[in-house]
Amino acid sequence: MKLNVNDRAYDVDADPDTPLLYVLRDHLQLNGAKFGCGLGQCGACTVMVGGEAVFSCLVPIAVVGGRGVKTVEGLGTKQVPGPLQAAFIEEQAAQCGYCIPGMMMRAQALLEKNAAPTEAEIRTALMPNLCRCGTHMRIIRAVQRAAGSMKRGHSG
Amino acid sequence: MPYAGGVPLETPFGTLYGTNITPHATTGIGRWSEPDFVRAMREGVDRNGKHLYPAFPYQHFTLLPDDELHALYAYVMTRTPVEYVPPANKLTFPFNIRPLLAVWNALYLRRHDHRPDPMQSAQWNRGAYLVQSLGHCGACHSPLNALGAEKRDDYLGGGYAEGWYAPPLDEKNPSPVPWTTQALAAYLRHGIAPQHAMAGGPMQGVVGGLAQASGEDVDAMAVYLVSLMGVSTPDREVRENQSLALANASRTDSATPAPSDARERLPSGASLYIGACASCHAEGRRASSGTALQLSLAVAVHEGDPSSLIRIIREGITAPEGERSRWMPAFAGALTDEQITALVTYLRTLAPEAPPWRNVSEQVAKARSSS
């Protein structure tokens, strides 16, 4: 199976009905997306496929086709974090951090469609993703901060 | 804000927005007298004599006796006034011409009192009254004619609501396991009942409302509706047995929930089922499966129309913000139209008693363009 992840082409030896999450983590060693529930209920596995935020635990690789996959590793690096990553750091939006890659990818999908979301739009968009530490208010602020910095065209 | 209006309702004639019925003097109904209110409820005419659209179900409220209208008036006039003007309706010509509703009313509006059936129990009669009046179940579950009026000769014979198929509640009811009074009452109150699919689409709002109704009233509605569905027939028993057998097979072998040849005939749909659905739906309703049901027991695969199955795959089931509810993830972003078409076609094989759907790809495209 051919996959394009973070603008890099991969050839993966896996069953077509294998969840994308397992391929990302076990075959490609992209461990940003997390396994939480495996039922599409928590959002920890959220990545982008063709610009849409999806639960990668419920997306078999067969359905990805030619659509590009983007994971949290595709947003920036440790040395040069992307605007969304930088905003999450600035707002200290992670506590345990398990939900954060999924939160970031759902927020990224939102910001690519709507560069200046209202707080209500951010809340609605992020609703499928859960955080058990309760950092929601910081996450909302981080997304607002990222929207601002993306608009100004620089990170942080 | 409760009762302040603005909730959009998609109709074949355009989009209507709920009006503000809080007692606000200028934007709500604060200056309405009780006779104004009663006239609106029974005749579909507002305080200024303007015709209301029948999406406001006054044709059902004609059944309400005076004392119930009096109680409703007292209730709405004691809510908190909210200053809010809902968006203007967006209706297509000629439906945007309100005076034409006088013609509609002349054709379809009947003033009638509710007459109890002396052959039936008091509970059945209470249920009949609630279903036909305040419940106005027929607004979605009855077929409509070209002018949006319910067809009287096919009461509760199945209809549409905001792009979802509202199944028949009469003897044509397609539920694979027949409804019992107990199961239907649980479903109406909680949106979930054993061996039945969860409430989705516009039914979620109905369940939210009925959760606040009295248990006796919901039980009465269930008694009446189950009586309309009638007694079991040989055809229904075949459907029930097949559905239960497929559900059991799905529990032991998630790869083959469908009749044995379906997997070979429809490999892409089968593969999608395994990758996207089986982790929750194969085992059936357990805590570890997110209370998902085996799909041979889901009414949406047995219906005459794929609309609801397509909608639920695309949109899932989500709670209104801040409320608890049942949950299913949405797949609109993950699956392409082609993939949803393949999946829906495969899932139809879980209803071996029913003919294949012929227009799945068109319906999938329609669901995408209207969301």
Image (cartoon, coloured by chain):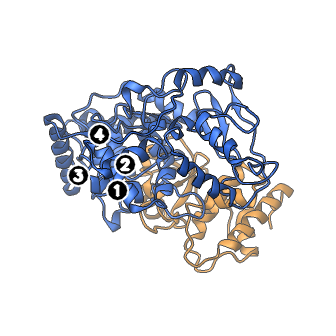
**Is label 4 in contact with label 1 (beta carbons under 8 Å)?**
no
CA distance for labels 4 and 3: 32 Å
Give the amino acid at mark 1.
Asp
Q: Which residue is mark 1?
A: B219
Q: Quadrant of residue B155?
A: top left
Q: Chain of mark 4?
A: B
Residue positioned most to the right = A152
Tag 4 secondary structure: helix
Is B149 rendered above or below residue B161? above
* Mark linked to residue B250: 3
Give the amino acid at mark 3.
Ser
Residue drawn at 59 percent across, 64 percent down: B322
Q: Chain of mark 2?
A: B
Shown in orange, the chain is A
Decide which of B158, A31 is in the foreground and name it: B158
* Mark linked to residue B228: 4
Q: Earlier in the sequence, mark 2 or mark 3?
A: 2
